[in-house]
């Protein structure tokens, strides 16, 4: 495969007989039937948290009442993070359709595709929802992104993930809003190996990379670790709600609705509404670590029954990036990050590393989260 630089123990190649996850997840485990631990865990546990017919309908209606009651006397009932992508756009559409007073928030990290910009504008205008843009300090943020590339780990998108969580909670707190509605869902995102994207809220790991490879102190880009999460949840009483788990969610049907109702524009693959995310997921992870992010999405869809394994394997026959345009993409990214094409190539060629090569709080956080889950149990659709 594409693990020529990998420093972890190599294994004979194997692919799951039920989904399409394979040994590019270096921690994958197979049972005697050749079925992997990832789809087994999804089917045994996570699938129960996705849409379950009348029971989920009742939960959905109860949740809408809860959100509206919490919003009484306030300007907004909920915050919806907008990226211009399918999931967040459809969440905004559903919220508006159900009569919620929505504040759309876009965290601008400087990498929006043209399609994403148009989609966000159309969502705000055609759905008639208020909208705020939270613009990240570019000098600090691009330094963070370069630091994670130089660290040579899969978590190149952690700077965006952490800033997004911080910004959404900050704005919710500012308006006294108790519910942030996320586009995350089990139907398309229920499977994701830890080695492919380690915990973005481990600030010890985050700060170790920034200190080692960054050149600027972090003063303006917002951060979000476990203790800040606890503060917002327990003191401010802010909940993160995964609304798409309460409804029968089909990406194809969602796209049809969005195109018809708000002139939504397709941007290609999953999360490709961001130029940088597209590069990281389709090229960087694939060529450096052998990680084809499509496997996780397609495996989730196979387990959810929205695609056949045969169709998924057919999609995986093609590389996730366009070989004809990748050079120009890298030139654009290098220029935007303030480096040269040659310097970027040298960074991309660095020996791969994983989160455990850097200081982290994995064991401590696992213990804390275990206690937290027991004290504050999630509901059956994954919300705290």
Image: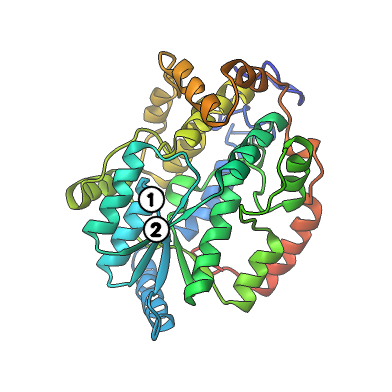
Quick check: can you spot residue 17? Answer: no
Residue at 39%, 67% (x, y): give it.
56
Residue corresponding to mark 1: 87
- Residue density around tag 2, few if under 14, some if 14–19, many if 20 or more, within 10 Å: many
Quick check: can you spot residue 131? Answer: yes
Depicted 104 relative to depicted 89: above or below: below
Q: Position of residue 227 (x, y in %)?
A: 71, 65
Q: Position of residue 328 (x, y in %)?
A: 45, 18
Discs 2, 1 touching: Cβ within 8 Å? yes
Residue at 36%, 47% (x, y): give it.
84
The Cα atoms of the two marked residues, 2 and 1, are separated by 8 Å
Q: In what element is the residue under mark 1?
A: helix
Front residue of this view, candidates 3 and 173:
173
The label on residue 244 is 2
Q: Position of residue 381 (x, y in %)?
A: 49, 64
Image quadrant in which you'd find residue 238: bottom right
In-image side of 358 versus 78 (left or right): right
Depicted 295 relative to depicted 85: above or below: above
Depicted 163 relative to depicted 156: above or below: below
Residue at 28%, 55% (x, y): give it.
123
Q: Position of residue 245 (x, y in %)?
A: 42, 59
The label on residue 234 is none
């Amino acid at each position: 495969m594409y693990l020529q630089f990998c420093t972890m123990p190599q294994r004979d190649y194997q692919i799951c007989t039920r989904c399409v996850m394979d040994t590019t997840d270096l921690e994958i485990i197979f049972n005697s039937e050749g079925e992997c631990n990832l789809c087994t865990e999804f089917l045994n546990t996570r699938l129960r948290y996705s849409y379950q017919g009348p029971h989920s309908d009742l939960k959905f209606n109860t949740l809408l009442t809860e959100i509206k009651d919490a919003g009484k006397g306030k300007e907004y009932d909920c915050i919806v993070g907008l990226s211009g992508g399918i999931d967040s756009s459809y969440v905004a559409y559903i919220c508006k359709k159900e009569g919620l007073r929505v504040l759309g928030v876009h965290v601008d990290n400087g990498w929006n595709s043209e399609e994403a910009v148009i989609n966000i504008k159309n969502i705000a205008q055609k759905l008639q929802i208020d909208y705020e843009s939270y613009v990240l300090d570019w000098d600090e943020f691009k330094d963070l992104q370069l630091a994670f590339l130089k660290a040579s780990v899969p978590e190149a998108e952690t700077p965006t993930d952490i800033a997004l969580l911080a910004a959404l909670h900050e704005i919710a707190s500012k308006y006294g809003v108790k519910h942030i509605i996320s586009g995350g869902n089990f139907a398309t995102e229920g499977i994701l190996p830890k080695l492919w994207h380690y915990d973005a809220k481990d600030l010890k790991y985050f700060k170790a990379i920034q200190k080692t490879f960054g050149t600027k102190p972090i003063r303006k880009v917002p951060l979000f670790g476990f203790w800040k999460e606890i503060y917002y949840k327990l003191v401010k009483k802010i909940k993160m709600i995964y609304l798409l788990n309460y409804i029968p969610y089909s990406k194809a049907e969602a796209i049809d609705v969005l195109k018809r109702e708000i002139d939504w524009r397709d941007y290609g693959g999953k999360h490709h509404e961001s130029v940088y995310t597209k590069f990281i997921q389709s090229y960087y992870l694939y060529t450096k670590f052998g990680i084809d992010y499509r496997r996780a999405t397609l495996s989730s869809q196979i387990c959810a029954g929205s695609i056949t394994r045969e169709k998924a394997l057919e999609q995986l026959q093609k590389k996730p990036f366009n070989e004809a345009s990748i050079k120009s993409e890298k030139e654009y990214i290098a220029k935007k990050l303030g480096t040269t094409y040659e310097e970027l190539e040298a960074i991309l060629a660095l020996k791969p590393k994983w989160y455990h090569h850097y200081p982290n709080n994995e064991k401590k956080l696992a213990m804390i989260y275990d206690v937290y889950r027991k004290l504050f149990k999630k509901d059956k659709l994954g919300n705290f």
